[in-house]
Structures are given as C-alpha cells and as structure tokens.
Amino acid sequence: MPLGWFEIPPNIFTIMSRNYPVLQVALDLMQSKRAIEIAREAVKGGADWIEAGTPLIKSEGMDVLRKLRAEFRDRIIMADMKTMDTGGFETEIVARAGGSINTVMGAADDGTIMEAVRAGRKYGCEIMVDLLGVEDRLKRAKEVEGMGVDYLCLHVSIDDQMMGKMGSEGIGELVREVDLPVAVAGGITSETAPDLVRAGASIIIVGGAITKSPDVEGAARTIREAITTKEPIDSNRYRRYSDSGGIRKALMEVSAPNVADAMHKKGAMVGIGPVKPGLKCVGPAFTCRTIDGDWAKTVEAIEKAGPGDVLVIDAGSRHISPWGELATWSCRMRGISGVILDGAARDIDDIYAMDFPVFCRSTAPNAGEPKGFGELQVEIECGGVEVRPGDWIIADDSGVVVIPRERAVEIANRALDVKERENRIREEIRRGSTLSEVLELEKWEKRQ
C-alpha cells in the first residue's frame, strides 16, 4: 500500500540502523520507470541506500519517492532536493512522501538549515548537508554540526567532473575534525571507492558507474566488493580525464556522433567524408590554407606538424587536388594522425590501400602547382566550421567534428558520458523495449 500524505515511513529508526561504509546508488535520470528498475538491480548487487537524484525529483516530483518507498520499504531513501530555501517545508514534503533523508545545501542560510533539522525531528527525516560550492568546507561543516544535522557530503558536481576535476580533497581532515558521518559523491568507481573508504568516508555515493552500466547488478556488486575489501577493482570504464593525453584516450573511445551530441550538435563539418570507411583519426589541428590546389603549403605542413596532429586543410578548390599518395606516405612516416581536406584528393586507390585516414570533400585526378601561396597555423574554415590551430578533431565514418581547444577536456568527458548512457539504453532496448518507450518520448514532447 503506497504511503499517504500523512503516513511516515514504517519503523523509521529501525530502517536507519547503520552498517558503514554504505553504498548509495544515485538515480539521476528523467524517468521513474527506468529509475526503479535500475534501483531493483542495484539493490540485488549490494546497494544499501537509494537516492532519488535531483534531476529525477525535478522530472517526476514527489511521486517518485512514493514509488520508491512502496518498492523498497526496508531501505533508506535519500531525496537529493538540494534545498536552498523553505528548509522545513521541503523536509516535511520529503518525509511525508516516504523519504528518509533530505539534502540541504551548505551554502543555504543558517535559518534554512535549522528549520530543516527541526522539521526532520518532527517528521522522522534526517538531514544531509551538501558542501558543494562552499569555499571553507571545514568551517561550514563545524557550523552545521552545531545546528544538529545528521550527515555531511563532499560532492564534486557532474559538470565539474566534465571539466576534469576529480576526488574529494580534504575528506581526511573533515572526518577527523567533525563528528558526523561523511558522504562522498562525484565520479566514484570501483577503482576510486576504496581510497575514499580508507580516508574515512562512511557513505559512498555512486551514480553513473552503476546506473549507466548494461549490467547494473554486476556493477553494484563490484563496487560493493571494492568498498568492503578496501581494494580497488579495475573497471576500465567511467573514467574521466583532465589533460591532453586523457583527451586523446577519451576521444579514441567515443564516436564523432557522441562528440556532436556532447556539443549540442555544434562543430560538425558538412560534406567531408572518409576516403576509406572504417578508419578513425583524433588529434589537435594543424591548419593549412592554400589556393586552387597549390600543394606547396600542404607538404610544408607535414614537416612542421607534430606526431599525433591532424592536418586540416582549406584547399580553395574542389576540382584541383593538393593532396595525393606521396603526401599521405609522408604523413604516415611523420606520425600524423590523419588529414581533413576541404577540397579534392587524388590517388584514391593508393590512399585506400594504405589504411591511412584521409577525409575529403571530393576527388579529382589533376593536381595543382607548388607555388607556395597560402598560410600555416592560422584560423581557417573547413567543412563550414571554424578551425583554429590546436582545436581537437575527431573523424570517423559518420563525419568530422571540431572541438574548441579550450573545451577539449570537458567535451571529451561529456562524450564519454553520452556513450555510457547509450550503453544502458541499448541494454533496455535489447530486453524488449523500444527507444521511444525507454525515453518516454510522447510524454516529453515539447509543448507550446
């Protein structure tokens, strides 16, 4: 029987008996049906607590808490409300909908936090303070401890993770200085969870490494084992990167469509495709502009570019080729990752046989003359997209996408996130659903 508006979860203090460290699964999805199915699998794999994530609550409202409580009557259910105002009222709503814990932001006013605590005592709901965005976390932690909150949370936001920020620095100091259980959240995997437990974390909050897995039960079981044994288990998934070497690794794992999705459909070149399907190139752009097939600058670019670079060429003509077999051989010998040519290539059969990634707009048998007109390492336009020296390029059978150099780390990580989410959706389709059913497209059609 679902909980009514005035019914408090049964045996709340029995439910809240603790055996730390706890594995909490964060359900940051849009659809309650998907979230509940994933929660079932996660619990089978060893998840202790269930979190209705902020996106899920904003999408489905308090009804999702009622559904989770009806399904998991013996589990702690945390509502990640991220309360910033009306602390008492929102805590009351959470409790009456079946939630065990409400999160209040540490950046909220003292009055908001104290009202949440008072309401929590009245309605049987505990309060976790999220220190996301707090500059002096230790100082604020001591202050909210004095207000009577029940938990603290060190949280690296999803958007910060995409920028390459990792870990929960300062957890050891917080555990030593504050007498409250400390939760940690933000990109945690079976590789990183043991370090956090050894540092003193009581609650390990895991989202994507469980919820995006095709095998949720197995993923939860692996992380549960890592937490219990305090030994890292190699997952080879759900990693995020923070430097140029990481950018290349990440982009080699994803597709050009993944990147285009991560960039909200920006950066995709038009009309440029592979000479030979099945090849991929990734790397920072070394740009070249030439005129009417003049191939002198394109050859000079090969000598000046570094290993791993991608030559991006504005050829100035679709009918006269500045690129052929010998230039391609030179690229291969110099360690160039690939060539993107807004213009014509020739010697197509030889380039095809070389298995070297060349992407072009057209083909033509005739070559230009090496007159030396043009420029290197300047901003150009290729395939209708602005390309600057150092912008990152990913090219595969679906096409070519340009990533602004200042966003390369972020977009590489977001593309990984896109791929991971699709992996889970693919599994749900494999089980008999359809894409429309998984995403509830009719419900989420834009309304005017």
Image (cartoon, rainbow, N blue to C red):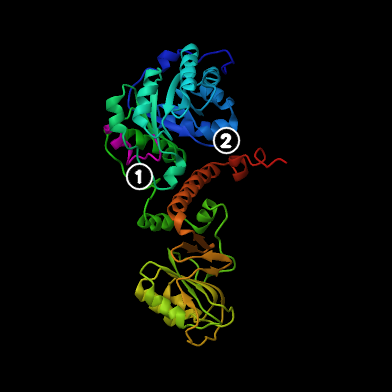
Q: Is residue 9 above or below residue 65?
A: above
Mark with earlier residue (2, 1): 2
The reply, left or right, for residue 228 in relation to residue 300 is left
Q: Position of residue 165 (x, y in %)?
A: 39, 44
**Element carrying mark 2:** loop
Q: Let me know if residue 200 appears in the view.
A: no
Above/below status of 50 relative to 269: above
Task: Please state if 362 lies on the left or on the right of 105 as rendered.
Answer: right
Horizontal and vertical percent position of residue 132: 43, 34
Q: Amino acid at mark 2?
A: Gln
Q: Quadrant of residue 306?
A: bottom left
Residue annotated with mark 2: 31
Considering the numbered disc 1 on the image, is that residue within a helix, a strand or a loop? loop
Percent coordinates x, y for residue 41 in the rendering: 46, 33
Left or right of 271? Residue 194 is left
Which residue occupies 50% across, 61% down? 402
Front-most of residues 144 and 168: 144
Mark 1: amino acid: Ser
Give 122 or 29, whichever is nearer the viewer: 122
Quarter that holds the N terminus: top right
**Magenta stretch in the rendered image:** 185-199
Query: What number is the disc on residue 48?
Result: none
Residue 328: image location, x then y, percent: 43, 77
Q: State which quarter of the image contains the C terminus.
A: top right
Left or right, residue 229 beside residue 164: left
Q: Of the numbered discs in the image, which one, if any, rests on residue 235?
A: 1
Relative to residue 200, is residue 398 depicted above or below?
Answer: below
Instruction: Give the distance between the C-alpha atoms of the residues marked 2 and 1, in whole angstroms.
Output: 27 Å
